[in-house]
Every structure is written in structure tokens, then in C-alpha cells.
Amino acid sequence: MPAERRYGTDHPHYAWSPLPARERLRLPRGARVALCVLVSLEHLDWSPPAGSHQPPGLYHRPLPEYWAISIREYGHRVGVYRILDLLARYRIRPTIAMDALTAEHYPYLVRYCVDRGAEVIAHGVAVSRMITSRMGEEEERRAIETSIAAVTRATGTAPRGWFGPEYGESERTPRLLAEFGIDYCCDWVNDEQPYPMTTPTGALTALPIALELDDVFALRDRRFPVDGWARNIRQAFDRCYRDGAKTGRVMVLSLHPHLSGQPFRIGFLDEAIRHIMGRKAVWPASGSEIVDWYRKGGKA
């Protein structure tokens, strides 16, 4: 990112905005917390393309390491259906972050998600092709365009949201997303409310994910025990629910079916979701529904 220091931030992508200085946000239905469940459907290349970037831990060497790679497909074949069934029981409309290779090569899965009313947003080309500042601008443009076009062809609807593979961005990404007509992105994890990003053209809203509750971050990278992860979700929600009495909070829960869809984990996720949905002042919503509410002034 640009190195120029500014008050409260070190880049020009958004204005410094401490929460106590903001106007009160009032969620629909008298809710204190808006819950958005973001389910990522990601394809992992068996052999990553030359020049592509992957974060540490995505692959196990030497390649091909079949178990490490094929476990991702478990999410597409088995795990995602458990998660979608769970969300349907609680009448939660999922937001599906789908990359281009999934959109192109898994038509049954795409139709399954669309037929159940999920919102589908763009998620790059593949989890093994992360967007970084190592890319030139034209390469990044092609990646974003490829992702958006693939989701549009597969679902019949242009995606409004964006979630970069492994949260990856360059210093150009917010500008390019706005130029391509994306309404919101989930890569910035620094808040419990949506906020406007600063772009030369278009309007881009940040919809922050609760990063420390992301199952990849917690279960794979930090090796939390699954019961501890589920307990953290409940505790985080309880605090947001309490704080939401003063101003509305948004909790974006990021799930990956190859992890959370495992038979020994789904019950813990069920307990956490049941705890959240057992409160009356909760608004389960898709990413676009939350962003539309926010852009209308954040009023009920």
C-alpha cells in the first residue's frame, strides 16, 4: 500500500472513522445484529500456474500431494450440502463466494446454490491464484473480469459482491472493483459495520468479515479446537448483540465447506447458529441486503 501516513490510516482507500463518532445505525426489524453467512466455493489447481501466488500453507510439498489437494473437492462434493441444509433450517439466505473455475466446472453445484436462493458473489479465478501487488494492472484486470464473467454466465446474474481469494488485494483492487461495477467487497476485516471505500469512480462498500472466526483462520491456521471455535462464535455474537443495543452491528461469518462441512464439525456449527438465531433481535441477511440497507442511510 502507499506509504504516506494519514490520521488513523496509512492509505487512501477509506476515511478514518472511529465507531463512537458515527451516527447510530438502526437495523431492520428492530435487530441488534445483522448476520451474513459467507460460504466460499474454491477450486484449488492441481498444479498452480507459473507466476501465480499462493499463501503459505495452501499446498503441501512435493506436488502432487493428493490428500492435501483433493480435500478441497470434498467441500464441493459433500460438505457444502450439509452447510446449506443447516442454513435453510434456520432460514438464513447464504452468500456464496464462488471462483471462476468452480462456476465453469461445477454446473450442478452452481444450480443447486441458485435454486435455493443464495446470493452468489465473485471470488477470483481460483484459491491458488491470489491477487497481489506482484501483478501488473492488466493482469489483475483480467483476473477480476474473468471472475465476474464466469459467475455471470453460470448464474445468469452479474455478481454485486467480491471476496478476493485468501483476502488478496493489490493497491489497485478497490479502484478496479468499482470500475467493474462491484458494489461491495469483503476483503477488509477492520470493522463491525459496513463503510464506504474511496474510489475515483463508482461506489464501493466494505462489508467486513469477522476474520478471527473464519474457519480457515481459526481451524487450519491457528488450530483452534472445534468446540473452542464454536464457543468463540457464540461469545463474539453475544458481545455484538449487547453492543448492538446502542448501534447496529454486522457479523459476517466466513465458512469453507471442506472444513465446516465435515461430519465431526457440522454439529458445533449448528450449535453456534442455533444460539445466534435463538435471539429475537437478529436479522439474517445476504451481503447485498445489508449493503442496500446501509446505503439507504442505515435506518430501519
Image (cartoon, rainbow, N blue to C red):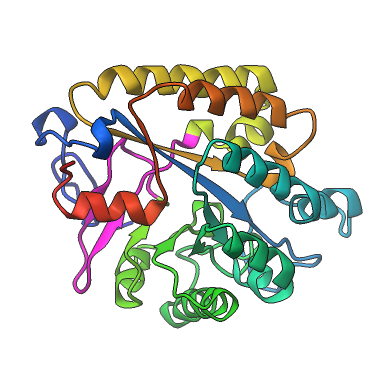
Locate the C terminus by quadrant: top left
Q: Residue drawn 66% across and 24% down?
A: 268
Vertical relation: 263 (above or below) 151: above
Residue 204 placement, left or right of 89: left
Which is more toward the observer, 28 or 103? 28
- For residue 57, say whether it is visible: no
Residue 134 placement, left or right of 12: right
Magenta stretch holds residue 207:
yes
Residue 149 placement, left or right of 249: right
Which x, y percent locates residue 155?
A: 56, 73
Which x, y percent locates residue 128?
A: 66, 61
Vertical relation: 173 (above or below) 145: above
Vertical relation: 163 (above or below) 228: below
Magenta stretch holds residue 214:
no
Which is more toward the observer, 16 or 295? 295
Which is more toward the observer, 50 or 179? 179
Which is more toward the observer, 5 or 231? 231
Q: Residue drawn 34% across and 59% down?
A: 184
Magenta part mainly helix, strand or loop?
loop
Locate the N terminus by quadrant: bottom left
Q: Which residues, given as a range, are shown in magenta?
A: 188-211
Q: Residue drawn 31% across and 37% down?
A: 191
**Rendered image quadrant of residue 173:** bottom left
Which x, y percent locates residue 223?
A: 68, 26
- For residue 149, say whether it is visible: yes
How many numbered callouts? 0
Which x, y percent locates residue 40?
A: 59, 52
Q: Residue drawn 44% across and 83% down?
A: 138
